[in-house]
Amino acid sequence: MRRATAPSPGRATIRAVTHSSGGPASPTPAPGAAPQLKRALGLGAAIVIGLSSMIGAGVFSAFGPAAQAAGPALLVGLALAFVVAGANATSTAQLAAQYPASGGTYVYGRERLGAWWGFTAGWGFVAGKSASAAAMALTFAAYAAPEAWLKPVALAALVALIALNSVGVTRTAAAARILVALVLAGLATVLVTAWMLEGASAPTGAQSFAAGLGEALGTPQGWYGVLQSAGLLFFAFAGYARIATLGEEVREPARTIPRAIITTLLAVAALYLVVAITLLVRLGAVGTAASTAPLADAVAEAPWAMVVVQVTAALAALGALLAGIAGVTRTALAMAREGDLPRPLAAVHPRFAVPHVATWALGAVVAVMIVVGDVREVIGFSSAGVLTYYFVANLAASTQTGEHRRYPRWWQFVGMGLCAVLVVTLPWQSVLGALAVYAVGFAGRMLVVRRRAARG
């Protein structure tokens, strides 16, 4: 399925860091060449960045809508979300081992399938995650500041994290490590408190899973609700892509990136399972579905614990924003190398070895989103974009052969099918929003391609 394309500066860079057994510590530029990214992240740092991306504010809010969609089948929806995430994660890990370059699925799609496939993945990721970054900044501010200070605090958080991302990926990883430690400590405190409080008992996790499975098998509406629930919960898993987008900054990428992706996914899946069972035991399926802040309601009898929930949610949103900035800017860097975004965005700082132009450009775009409105209500298109991104990843992985194949090809077709099914179950407004965003991107790229062709 691979299409032959003419070499470009970006493609040369990708080949310089592509290898089958780990490769060099970093690309070695020729004397006088432009600065390059540096391989500075080990396994621990890569895992921390993945955890920071995945354990975001969604864990505090996604379970309510998911329970509303699935009812007693909440755990079935969580299990299905994990299956989808597992297929996507293994495909991403397999591709990242062969193509340890910045850009994630944008690079994989372009290398394995062709330029338009890569653009489809990259454009959806950059557009959707830019809106998500604005949403995370506003979510942090909603927990950390009064209503009147919402946007100023969101902008201040954005500027601080943009500046932090601009002074080196190791500092980003260090900050993520602190945030992840605080968030995990806060979640552990809340979950232990929820189990220690007295209250009416709901069915156990196993009973809820069995009852939900029976409901899902019994009616088409039950299955539809489970699929919607899985779609909502899947996006809480999707942060492992951040590890792959930092492919040029990870040491021994062929070994480190796959291990980091799988380890992060399993750890977060275990955490989400504990959260789901805790909510079902404390609130039941009906109570969880009716709540806008399920974890806070689960410890409502202990006011101090509700404060812990608020602080932890704010820190989680901050961590997701920090890792999101790193992921989007590396994808923008890869797209700029190939001319799919303005080429100045490919600049790398000579001292800090980060895509500093792309980082500050992203900050400007996200700041405008924050000022213009509350994007938390209008970023549904990012859901469809993420699923499209992973559809391309699975399709690209299905074309790999020989020593680069780590997982069965049928597993990647399972991932493609489930991504397509979950897109269909999204609200129609989200699908239309995604189509509009892609139409703008495709139209712009088509004009650029035609202008280049006209110039010879």
Image (cartoon, grey):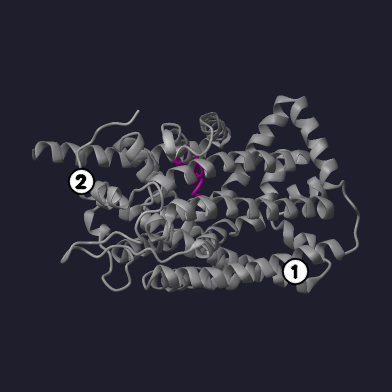
Task: Note whether residue 381 is visible.
Answer: no
Q: CA distance from mark 1 to mark 2?
A: 52 Å
**Residue at image location 28% in from the left, 38% down from the top:** 443
Q: Amino acid at mark 1?
A: Thr
**Residue at image location 62% in from the left, 70% down from the top:** 181
Q: Nearer the viewer, residue 289 or 214?
A: 214
**Is the residue 238 above or below the residue 227 in the image?**
below
Question: Mark 2 sits on what residue?
Answer: 8
| Contact between labelled residues 2 and 1, with CB atoms less than 8 Å apart | no
Rendered image: mark on residue 189? 1
Extent of the magenta region: 378-389
Left or right of residue 360, residue 372 in this image? right
**Residue 95 percent across, percent down from the top left:** 43, 43
Label 2 secondary element: loop
Instruction: Name the quadrant of the N terminus.
Output: top left
Label 1 or label 2, whichever lies nearer to me, is 2
Q: Amino acid at mark 2?
A: Ser
Left or right of residue 326, residue 30 in this image? left
Q: Nearer the viewer, residue 152 or 182?
A: 182
**Is the residue 324 above or below the residue 437 in the image?**
below
In this view, which residue lies farthest toward the left?
A: 456
Give the quadrant of residue 306.
Answer: bottom right
**Residue 168 percent across, percent down from the top left:** 38, 71
